[in-house]
Image: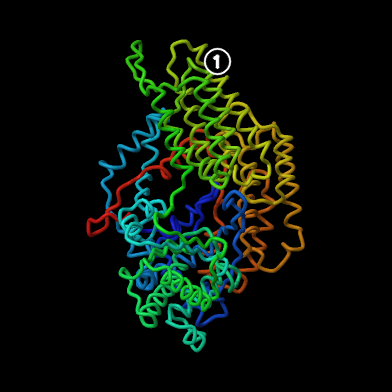
Amino acid sequence: MIPNLILKTEVLPEDIPMNFSNKHLQKHYYNTELIKLFTELDEQNEHSRSKNLRDMATIPLKYYIPKNNYNLRRLGLLHPLAQLQITEFLINYSTRIVSECSKSNFSVRSPIGLNNTKINMKEYSEKKLRSLLNEFSTLEVPNDLKDLVDLRYKSFFTYKHFKSLKEMMESPSFNRVKHKFTYSLKIDIQKCFDSIYTHSLTWSILGSKELGKIFISGNGFAHRADKIMQKTNYNETNGIVIGNEFSRVVAEMLLSQIDLEIESTLFTDFGLNLNKDYKIYRFVDDYYIFSNSKEYVNLIQKVLIEILNNYNLNINDTKVNLQEAPFKYYDSSILKLKNLLSSFRRRLEINIYDSANNENHLNIGTRYEWKLLYNNVEELIIEYPESKSRIVKYFLKSIRNLIEYDRNNLPVIKEIIEILTNVYSLYIDINSTNNYIAIMLKLLTGTRNDNNDDQTLSKHSIIILDDLLFENCFRVIKNNEDSLSYMTDLITFMKLLDKKISAQYLCKILNNSKYNYFIYCTVGNYILEDRRLKVDNIYQTVFNKLKADLSEYITLDSNKKNQIILNSEYFYLINDFSKYPGLEFLKTEFENKKKEVIHNQNDILRKLWNNLTSDSYFKWNSSSEDLSKEFLKKIMYNNINIQFINNYDTPLF
């Protein structure tokens, strides 16, 4: 079992700012140490009034990200204590979880074992890392990115078949099924994670709702699974926290039992055989049903609805999609966008030889060509408005390879930046923000690593590009203030630029985002001097605003409640800013709140809380160099396609 892997991969949402990290938890609590901690607490609890660590309920920090063009999805950042509770649960029950998830013959993304993968870093990783390092024009990063070996471990479990819906759709097996059957029905579960009734986990693990109600209490696996979903979500029984991988694994256990009951009912009551009379693929909460009989398809839908209802789940009626062959499960807009980009790439005549420097350069095109491409992308979005989010994200991710800094073509660079900003503005979420930053960072590192002999010209180019980047980044922030929560990393990126956001505007951001943990931390980090844990003098008014707001926050009636430290919003905001320069007064407040929890508790629990609060979870004052490397690591982590091999030497993904 890989030390700390659970804390790295299972408990945090992917959609959090770059500067947030639970690394100091990983340092304090290796798997073996965590088991020892819980065991010692169990032993002492038998002879004391100390509350069982597993019974402490915490409130996650709730925040929203775009789900699609029109709707938002609510995610939850778990309290550090909840992260440890989940880690202990997974260490103890990982084998049982795999067993529960193996019930389904429908699922294409269920855990099949622990991640004991092997990877040939030399063959796969080094080549791709080198490619990205060359793209971002830096030679200093490799020695500082040794932890990129963690790229091989993106999850605690290994998964069967497919890691993404796109992989499933493009797989030979799925396409063979599409051509084997005449009818197809797509169904998804309505608000699946929000609708999961935690007691239904007990029903599914014990095999029936009736047994679950008879054996309603206990300390076995079924009841522990129910309890941990409650305790990490403030004792809520309706709905589980969305965003972390652990919740997806728990949902998979429940849905695997539902799949088993569907298959059994179809065979026992109606004589339908899987793979012969029908085929079902389930990716998380999406069902893809195939059959040569329309009657069978309707029957399967009826059975699926009935069994889902037994577990307090429902299908989304508005998304039920019955098709007759040939089936359309691809996005036509993306196919057209791929063709647009391919044509654009061909027009650029990819390599231009620079005889003076004996180098090959990318032809970045002309202003006209880029304007034409932008017009085509806009027309594509107009034609497929439902696909706007996918078009924007695919475009920003794909176009980066066709862009590089060229000091001889600054007008074209300016046009490119303008166009990319316009496209990004059409759909802003954390994913599109990351892709936009990746391109801006590539241009920035390109100009700052420009080896032009004419230093005056080089400095002039740096100033021009710096101004262009600032103006466009600031424009997109100012014009989309409602989306600021998804652009916190863009503000962090702007710290790398010479031109700075005004103190007045930063105060406006704070006013419009009252007590928003991620935004307050991002602004707080922005106003610190580079390489020094000290507020820049030009931002003293922003610091005063932060100080006044946080002073007000701790006096709110809602924050005077006993054990408020178990509320993640309060915990993260006050813990992290108590480590911020000039806000030491928060330490006293935070220590008093901590005493409410550890009062009458044993020494082991006191030490635990001291470890939980020893550091800030938001990394204050990373240097410009550190920020550049963090951005680069994030880009690498999200883009490198590493071949994973399990112990049987078969591809996992």
The residue under label 1 is 460
Please report the residue visible at 56 percent of the width from the left and 71 percent of the height from the top.
Answer: 231
- SS category of the residue bearing label 1: helix
Q: Does residue 315 sit above or below 575 in this rendering?
A: below
Residue furthest left as drawn: 648
List x then y, in percent, for residue 608.
52, 64
Quadrant in the rendering for residue 379 = top right
**For residue 345, side relative to residue 456 (left or right):** left
Residue furthest bottom as drawn: 214
Q: Locate the N terminus by quadrant.
A: bottom left
List x then y, in percent, for residue 593.
66, 63
Quadrant in the rendering for residue 647 = bottom left
For the residue marked with disc 1, what is the amino acid? His
List x then y, in percent, for residue 471.
63, 28
Quadrant in the rendering for residue 234 = bottom right
Query: Considering depth in this image, is 283 or 10 the residue closer to the camera?
Result: 283
Q: Locate the C terminus by quadrant.
A: bottom left
